[in-house]
Amino acid sequence: MKISSNFDSGNINILDASSPGNIRLSINKDNNSDFYQWFHFRLTGAKGQLCALNIEGADGAAYPGGWENYQVVASYDHETWFRVSTVYKNSTLTIQHVPETDSVYYAYFAPYSYDRHQELVSTAAMHERVKLDVIGESCDGRDLDLLTIGEEREGKKKIWIIARQHPGESMAEWMVEGILNRLLDDDDALSRELLNNCVFYIMPNVNPDGSIRGHLRCNAKGQNLNRDWDDPDPEISPEIFHLRNKMDEKGLDFSLDCHGDEALPYNFIACFEGVPDLNQYNLDTAYMFGRELERANPDFQNGKGYSKSAPGTGNLGMSTNQIAHRFNAVSMTLEMPFKDTVDSPNPETGWSPERSIKLGYSTLDALSAILERL
Ligand code: ZN
């Protein structure tokens, strides 16, 4: 029996793996940071044995509330993921599972691999309406890929969609895959019409280093990128430095920043109530987008979410606030659950890549419905 995590987005620390009935593990912190919660590892040689995998110190994770009513995901082929029995008790997260084969992967959520990211971007770039730009390099020297979809022309609305500032929130890139697939489907009349009126700037993975390193929230240098939008330092947050510069260059009318929330079992949006000189019309448009998304897809709802910032107290280091303020634009953070949706549950999968992809499709319905207000 062996446990390993030395692969793309792997993260686990082995304390004791001598007995399948009491495997002791812990999660490594993001480099140069105290955040931890993302895990992804492989168990081999335990076919047919009842395994108890105990992740110790779970109470010290970034969001311990994330473990309540949470079930770990597992996969034999690294492609199809299912939920396994999980108990959180006395600061330990315990997975109880009898693997059906000699190789099984466990993770916090279905990973979105760097290979799949490269395929997504390269395949999109084959489409005649798509332009691919590498807008800079990450700390570890990886390409920061930006896709431009649709002809850039005066008078078109500029729509920005970004994902994975927080690398452990892999559902965000699954969602972007859905958005891209629908936008590039020539048989989809809504997409064709959107592309007549808009140009899309899409960055499927803002933080490739954190993704590959198996981080929850930070880049390679330990920066929480979604706190660095006010004054991004090219040395330690090159990802945001380059992205914000590109937004300044191109302009922006609407922005969707895709995330996952560890604790809340809902899909919801967070807006920019706390920014200085709040533009109420833009805020109303964002709320309207939320209502249209709920209409288009019952997995989404508007009743539950974060509490709204008081006027003037918004953190301009966060993308949604900085963008709303900087561009006088409609800007929002879309959060998906790690667990499942309370109102529309699917216990076998919980929240999943497939549901994230479909929610991505639906965002285009909602965008279309509010377009004339941009
Ligand atoms: Zn996030």
Image (tube, rainbow, N blue to C red):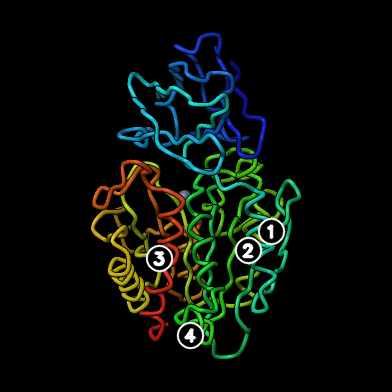
Looking at the rendered structure, the kind of residue marked 3 is Val
Q: Is residue 273 left or right of residue 216?
A: left
Name the outermost residue toward the right: 141
Q: Is residue 68 left or right of residue 164?
A: left
**Nearer the observer, 148 or 235:** 148
Question: Residue 141, image x and y in percent?
Answer: 76, 50
Spatial CA distance of label 4 from label 3 is: 32 Å
Q: Is mark 4 within 8 Å of ligand 1?
A: no
Question: Is disc 2 in contact with disc 1, using a CB cutoff of under 8 Å?
Answer: yes
Which circle's residue, 2 or 1, is located before the other in the chain? 1
Looking at the rendered structure, the kind of residue marked 4 is Glu
Question: Is disc 3 in contact with disc 2, using a CB cutoff of under 8 Å?
Answer: no
- Of marks 1 and 3, the one in the foreground: 1
> According to the image, label 2 marks what residue?
243
> According to the image, label 1 marks what residue?
144
Q: Quadrant of residue 3?
A: top right
Looking at the rendered structure, the kind of residue marked 2 is Leu
Question: Residue 186, image x and y in percent?
Answer: 55, 79
Number of other residues with Cα within 10 Å of mark 2, as a class: few under 14, some 14 to 19, many 20 or more: many
Question: Is disc 4 in contact with disc 3, using a CB cutoff of under 8 Å?
Answer: no
Residue 275, label in figure = 3
* Secondary structure of residue under mark 1: strand
Spatial CA distance of label 4 from label 2 is: 27 Å
Q: Is residue 149 above or below residue 307?
A: below
Which circle's residue, 4 or 3, is located before the other in the chain? 4
Q: Is mark 2 within 8 Å of ligand 1?
A: no
Question: Is disc 1 in contact with disc 3, using a CB cutoff of under 8 Å?
Answer: no
- Of marks 4 and 3, the one in the foreground: 4
Number of other residues with Cα within 10 Å of mark 3, as a class: few under 14, some 14 to 19, many 20 or more: many
Looking at the rendered structure, the kind of residue marked 1 is Leu
> According to the image, label 4 marks what residue?
193
* Secondary structure of residue under mark 2: helix
